[in-house]
Image: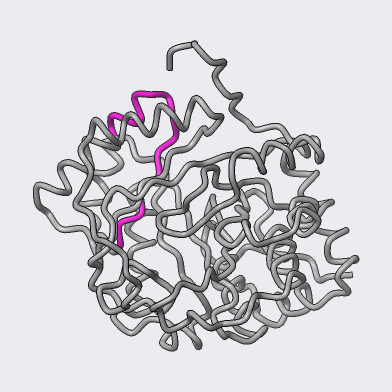
Amino acid sequence: MAPSPTTSSELSRESVSKIYRLPLMELVFQAAGVHRNNHPTNSIQCSTLLSIKTGSCAEDCSYCSQSARNDSGLDPERLMDNESVVAAAKAAKAKGSDRFCMGAAWRGIKDNDDFERVLEMVSSVKDLGLETCLTAGMLEPHQADKLRDAGLDYYNHNLDTSPEYYDQVVTTRTYEDRLETLASVRVAGIKVCCGGILGMGESEDDRIGLIHELARQTPPPESVPINALVPIPGTPLAENPPLPWDQMVRAVATARILMPKSDIRLSAGRSSMTEEGQALCFLAGANSVFMGDKLLTTPNATETEDAALFRKLGLEPIAEPTPQGVPV
């Protein structure tokens, strides 16, 4: 049996390791029990992610097509207008998403006209009856307050990997920078969306370290996206081999045991997983996905594929799709 989980700041990495390295079937069995005790077993939370400002980012994240330092061939795009964002949010709601996530490729938020436009987008999407999420890099406490007042429900800022491996992936900001942004989000009363990426060349110990850092936050993130690297030509990680499927299952199951109340989102890389692999992740406690055929600039499972898989597994989106012809 795994040690009794705790979500306090005193959670040890050793205890996380013992859970992560349980025999896989035992790990999944325990995680499924935790999931059933804390969430509806046949419901899945569906989000849609839209890139509202694409490319030309000053960061050097090794996995990202949007870094200006990576020759990925991506065409930069300016910040979208509010009307286009609202139209995309309406379409997402009609297809069954209950949360609309907006991503801006910035190193950090600046106090300028673009930020004011983003605040307008948040308010407009919130007015549609959707939960709102934003990822836009680092932010200061007063900016978090403005986002809260505009109606932001979640702010996404991933830790990416373990503290020890972080500088092998990103050098233009520190792990502490990320933690400070998360602290600003917390103090403002905005829910935290924070996870990481697996398959970037890190060790299993680093995957354990990432989950340890997430679970020891007080409280843990309300939303935990677990991504598998999508290798993108022109980035330093373009030739990385695929992540073994069992590592994704182990990460999902361990996260579920240690963060029982959080939404655990099976995120980027899902399009390359088999139906069986995804099913095992859902059994192990994943209860959230991104809908739509693109996640910022990377491919995602199509709506048709998702609908077919959900039918097979008996999973029902929390928000029902709007019947055709019904205004949203």
Residue under the image location 78 percent in, 39 percent down = 41
Quadrant where the N terminus lies? bottom right
Residue under the image location 52 percent in, 41 percent down = 47
Residue under the image location 65 percent in, 33 percent down = 317
Say if the magenta span includes residue 226: no
Q: Position of residue 224 (x, y in %)?
A: 56, 57
Color encoding of the figure: one colour
Q: Residue furthest top?
A: 326
* 170 lies left or right of 208: left
How many discs mark residues in the rendered view? 0
Please name whichever residue, 194 or 12, is drawn nearer the observer in this view of the structure: 194
Please name whichever residue, 117 or 243, is drawn nearer the observer in this view of the structure: 243
Magenta residues span: 123-137
Q: Position of residue 42 (x, y in %)?
A: 77, 36
Quadrant where the C terminus lies? top left
Say if the magenta span includes residue 135: yes
304, above or below 32, in the image: above
Residue 227 sits in quarter: bottom right
Q: Position of residue 158 (x, y in %)?
A: 45, 65
Residue under the image location 62 percent in, 56 percent down = 271
83, above or below 261, in the image: above
* 253 lies left or right of 201: right
Q: Position of residue 218 (x, y in %)?
A: 52, 60
